[in-house]
Amino acid sequence: MKLVLGYLYPSVMSQYGDRGNVLTIQNRCEWRGIDLEVDALEVGDRVDPDRVDLLLTGGGADTHQRLVFEDLLHVKGDGIRQAVEDGAAAFAVCAGYQLWGHYYRTAGGEDLPGLGVFPAHTIHRANQTGTLLDTITKAGSTRAVGNLVVQWGSRVLVGFENHGGRTYLDGGAQPFGRVLAGAGNNSEDGWEGCVYKNAIGTYMHGPAFPKNPALADHLIKAALSRRYGSVTLDRLDDGQENSARQRALEQVSRPGRWRRLWSDGVG
Amino acid sequence: MNGTGAAGGARPARAGQVTRLQGVPARAAAAGAGKTLRFMSRALGRGGGTTLPGHVAGRIDPGLVASLAASLPNGCVLVTGTNGKTTTTRILAGAARAAGLEVITNPEGSNMLSGVATSLLVRTNGLGFLDVPASTIGIFEVDEGALPSAIEALSPRLVVITNLFRDQLDRYFEVDFVAKLWEKAMSGLPPTTTVVLNADDPQVAHLGDDIDAKVIHFGLEDRQWARPALEHAADSRRCPKCNHDLLYDLSFYAHLGHYACKECGWRRPDPRFAAWKVKLNGVDGSLTQATTPSGERTIRLPLPGLYNACNALAAAAAASCLGVDPDLVQVAAEGTVCAFGRFERVSVGGKNAVLLLVKNPTGFNESLRLVLSAEGPRYLLFGLNDNGPDGRDVSWIWDVEFEACRGRLAYLAISGQRAKDLALRLKYAGVCADYRSRPAEGPAVVPMLAEDMVRAFFRAIEQTPEGETLYVLASYTALWTLRRELVQRGHLAPFWRQVQATRSVTR
């Protein structure tokens, strides 16, 4: 069996370790004897909906979003929408997730139109509160930064979120999961991410796949099923993955230490 | 809890501001409280007391740090950047001392405004006025995020910026955000200030465009260190002027190199301090031949790696701005005492270990490259914590090229609170034996996992044969925990004593 992974904007939109998601898919396919080809799809490259089985897009800053949003709309948009409609698997993280919704309103109040794959829109918190982002403290006050724990079906996933945007789902939209710890979409309604067909949008960095292998396998399986009909994945030894997730979950509830003032010479 | 909290106490006050009537008692109280705290901190064994005194004093008299800095006879220098600021500060301070200047500096890590304030406070008299010789200058390293407030409070005569990489995104959020903060801070500098910038880093070099301050660039011209392609950890591949792609003629590491914008024509400025030949002697150091406005200079550095050669070049450029002969940089560089975790050598029971602090993908990549540069298998200990100073987000390890370790390790230990994340990263990098062997690339290792950094270190050093070196690459608090134990057991001196030792030796 063979899969093609379309890695969107690897040089621009992979600022938060999201490359780990690609490495995870590569390895988990290789261990199962599934051939995987990775297409790096930069600005200017089209998306062929008949070729790609799995699309990944990672996080980037506002400036990166501004660099890619027009390309996303006019060069890749049709291909991505067709692929997703046709059942291709997709995983869009953070800035990628935001641009796959209806629109993203930046801190400065500019609306970047999105793909509309996810029935959701995003507004930067600084725009909601009228905060001027001229110091780190002020920027920090608008952002949701920290460990993110999500109930996804019967599973508990763990990752890290770091975003200024707040995402609101349209009525009837299907969220990705429920927030157990962290902010998720908007720290108001308790939902995290969005799902449309086999596409998942989420704020979960970490990266998400290595410590949550079930999520990676879910997407591999969806991608294979679209091409080859119903498939069963070989089981892998995920002892290390599960124990890393467990340990990360313990860290979430740990009390804060290393206060700057008392630390001598640290930070 | 992390970040700007400590600096927040000192509300900006202009240097030279007329002191209010209650000014002298307030500053005396502030300075006195600060100094008492420092004494107590050391007496109680809580550490060097290198930031809290300044913080408390700033609360009592917010204008204190500005007025103290304003009374520095030779003004002050600020050094910032993601990587290399500590080493650059140390070399520059050494050169200034060798030139006969009395240097006030802050110990590494205490680089928020409160740390700078503390180092000034301890030099005050009972009334809270600086009590220093006329030859005194302040040379401070400052945190990237603290640069704007430090410039505002300290009115520096010289600002040195080494580079800008992605680092602690949980704290700085976005590389571009830091770049914007710097840009704003630079635009407010007067023509009397000089800025020393790295020409090879587009976002840093760009800071010198259209500002009132004098600008001097330093850069690398030695083509032999060019790499074929930009690395994954490269952050700014875009023209800071017009946002189009930068074309790289040479790429050294991360996004450092020789570049030009194909759209607007903006290109790397020609550096006035140019290293045209850098000879790296493995882990022992480097020899740099540089062109400077005052002629050819050779800088021999006992610290290894291309990035340290660049730090020395930055220090040379800064020194010449202070009127210090670059030859003295050579003298200072040779006597550089290793900073915290900057290739710090430790001997434990006749076995050798080297401590390397790793904070971000670029630093980690360069440290790995250095450790793996010589032939033969390596003994490694990785440590990863997720406390505030380490960055609570550990995702950056996925941007580090651990794949370079495949088949190169004789022994691997993994430690820290997030040891399991690291182990997973190494599994997916194909480094570990229990997972899949890559016979063509040499033997794979079975890692030893122990979250406790101290235990991991002593187990690892036990496994390291005599004559071999254990390389410890760890994040801030992981290394700090280990270092504290090594100090307690007498293998290392506390680093604030090291700073004092350097000072008294050169005096």
Image: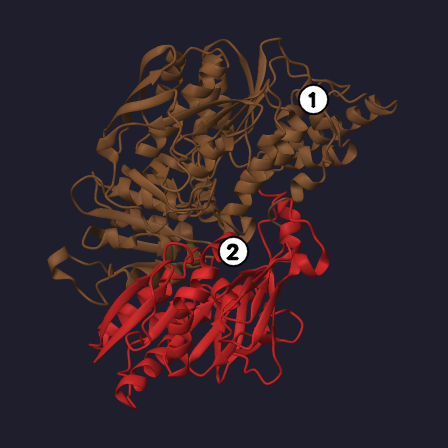
Chain colours: A red, B brown
Q: Position of residue B425 (x, y in %)?
A: 34, 61
State the residue in front, B201 or B323.
B201
| Disc 1: CA contacts within 10 A as few (<14), some (14-19) or many (>=20) | many
Q: Which residue is mark 2?
A: B392
The reply to whether residue B294 is visible in this rendering is: yes
- Disc 2 residue type? Arg
Q: Position of residue B432 (x, y in %)?
A: 24, 61
Instruction: Specify the quadrant that holds the C terminus of chain A.
Output: top right
Left or right, residue A99 beside residue A128:
left
Q: Which residue is mark 1?
A: B68
The residue furthest left is B440
Rendering quarter of residue A37: bottom left
Q: Secondary structure at mark 2?
A: loop
Identity of the residue drawn at 51% across and 74% down = A116
State the residue in front, A67 or B277.
A67
Identity of the residue drawn at 47% across and 34% down = B206
Q: Position of residue B10 (x, y in %)?
A: 72, 36
